[in-house]
């Protein structure tokens, strides 16, 4: 999604909606299966003073979560025993971050790196990077902060590798930082993909925005919204050269929206909004090509006008060992796709259904649960509840290669 998307909230569940949606998917999507797991929520955690954008599982203790609450700041949660909902154990308000909204987080050791700046602000927002000490999750402590000197379009995501941090700053590109000193993050440069691809002089609505980030070896992959997937070769400090770009040729006459991506073994899995999931060969980044496309809402047809789509995939996680892709899907909540055969991705599990008053934005995957953030919003779906939900994982097993899990 781009900045034109507003925000607001969620409610109920309808059995009839489940059944009619299942029938429609089976009839219209050849990658769907007749039967699938209907995943059950373990607990729900309501948020009344913020809009949860993303959730991260503490890499040292899976019963602790970090919740990016936009205007509500950053919260640390402790999960209860059994199916008990979590409780908040620490909070940093936006006042700690120069009043910038908290949009995304990534953990590296005992540090959390935060992407700051409201990407939905009609008049724009500064972008920022914050570094928080989470050695003791019940006592979150800000130790480093950088804020852009000018108003841009906020930030969508953050990625950290070693002493480098990357902040996806929407139309402003990707901000690169030296974080060798956590107390003094140092801005290095901006990686700005060519805005005239795939459409020359795209205008405000079709303007590309850097939304999602992944690194594979020495290559930075950018989900560049309307600008497709971009690949940059990373050099030292200010050196970054674009070596590859990709868009779906079958969507050439439609608005495209590459929101997020993960990469494993030279294959990119991209959440493409109302166009579902694309699977792209990137073993040679200069010659990327589509391996498979899970397109349940028929985004390539005139009947899907974005606003009326039954789903909008946003955040993505890959369980490499089981060859499953998890997608936060807006009105369709959680969709789980089997990608053991990249050419024929198949829906095998889900949680929620369109039209029930609940819609997701964020997603994180743990060993025994998927975590979904829900938003109050009125476009592109109606949501009347904000919060965090823990959902059981599907029972499906695959015989795919035993590789790492990405989230």
Image (cartoon, rainbow, N blue to C red):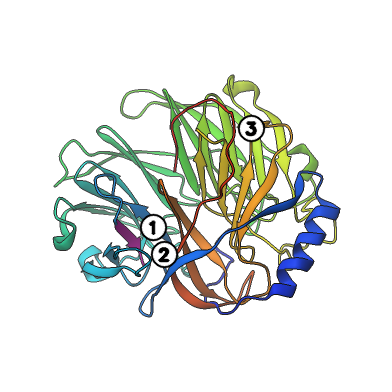
Q: What element carries label 1?
A: strand
Report if residue 72 is visible in the image.
yes
Q: Where is residue 74 in the image (x, y as percent from the top left)?
A: 29, 64
The label number, if any, that marks residue 55 in the structure image: 1
Report if residue 201 is visible in the image.
no
Contact between marks 1 and 3 (CB within 8 A): the answer is no
Identify which residue is drawn at 64% across, 36% down: 339
Compared to residue 225, the image places residue 373 above or below, namely below
Instruction: Work out which quarter of the rendered image holds the C terminus and state it.
Output: top left
The label number, if any, that marks residue 340 in the structure image: 3
Q: What stretch is highlighted in magenta?
A: 64-69
Compared to residue 350, the image places residue 253 above or below, namely above
Compared to residue 304, the image places residue 121 above or below, namely below
Specify whether 17 is left or right of 242.
right
Q: Is mark 2 on a helix, strand or loop?
A: loop
Say which quarter of the image contains residue 324: top right
Residue pointed to by mark 2: 118
Q: Furthest-top residue in view?
A: 284
Which mark is first along the chain, 2 or 1? 1
Compared to residue 7, the image places residue 115 above or below, namely above
Q: What element carries label 3?
A: loop
Specify whether 57 is left or right of 112.
right
Identify which residue is drawn at 18% across, 53% down: 134
Q: Residues within 10 Å of mark 2 (few under 14, many from 20)?
A: many
CA gap between label 1 and label 3 equals: 26 Å
């Amino acid at each position: 999604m781009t900045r034109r998307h507003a925000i607001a909230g969620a409610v109920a569940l309808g059995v009839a909606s489940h059944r009619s949606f299942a029938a429609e998917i089976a009839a219209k999507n050849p990658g769907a299966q007749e039967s699938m797991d209907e995943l059950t929520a373990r607990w729900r955690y309501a948020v009344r003073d913020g809009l949860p954008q993303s959730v991260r599982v503490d890499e040292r203790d899976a019963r602790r979560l970090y919740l990016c609450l936009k205007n509500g700041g950053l919260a640390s949660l402790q999960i209860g025993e059994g199916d008990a909902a979590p409780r908040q154990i620490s909070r940093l308000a936006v006042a700690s971050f120069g009043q910038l909204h908290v949009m995304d987080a990534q953990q590296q050791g005992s540090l959390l790196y935060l992407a700051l700046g409201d990407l939905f602000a009609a008049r724009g927002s500064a972008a920022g990077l914050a570094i928080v000490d989470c050695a003791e999750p019940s006592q979150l402590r800000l130790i480093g902060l950088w804020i852009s000197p000018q108003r841009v379009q906020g930030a969508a995501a953050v990625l950290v590798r070693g002493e480098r941090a990357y902040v996806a700053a929407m139309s402003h590109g990707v901000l690169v930082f030296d974080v060798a000193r956590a107390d003094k993050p140092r801005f290095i440069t901006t990686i700005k993909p060519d805005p005239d691809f795939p459409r020359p002089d795209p205008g405000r609505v079709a303007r590309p925005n850097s939304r999602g980030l992944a690194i594979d070896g020495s290559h930075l992959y950018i989900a560049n919204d309307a600008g497709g997937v971009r690949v940059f070769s990373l050099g030292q400090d200010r050196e970054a050269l674009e070596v590859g770009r990709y868009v779906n040729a079958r969507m050439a006459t439609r608005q495209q929206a590459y929101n997020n991506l993960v990469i494993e073994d030279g294959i990119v899995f991209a959440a493409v909004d109302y166009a579902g999931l694309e699977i792209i060969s990137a073993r040679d980044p200069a010659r990327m090509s589509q391996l498979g496309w899970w397109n349940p809402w028929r985004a390539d047809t005139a009947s899907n006008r974005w606003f009326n789509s039954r789903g909008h995939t946003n955040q993505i996680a890959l369980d490499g060992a089981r060859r499953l892709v998890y997608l936060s899907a807006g009105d369709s909540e959680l969709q789980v796709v089997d990608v053991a055969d990249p050419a024929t991705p198949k829906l095998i599990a889900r949680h929620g259904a369109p039209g029930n008053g609940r819609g997701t934005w964020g997603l994180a995957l743990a060993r025994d649960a998927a975590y979904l953030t829900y938003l109050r919003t009125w476009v592109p779906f109606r949501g009347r509840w904000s919060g965090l939900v823990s959902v059981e994982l599907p029972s499906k097993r695959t015989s795919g290669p035993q590789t790492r899990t990405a989230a």
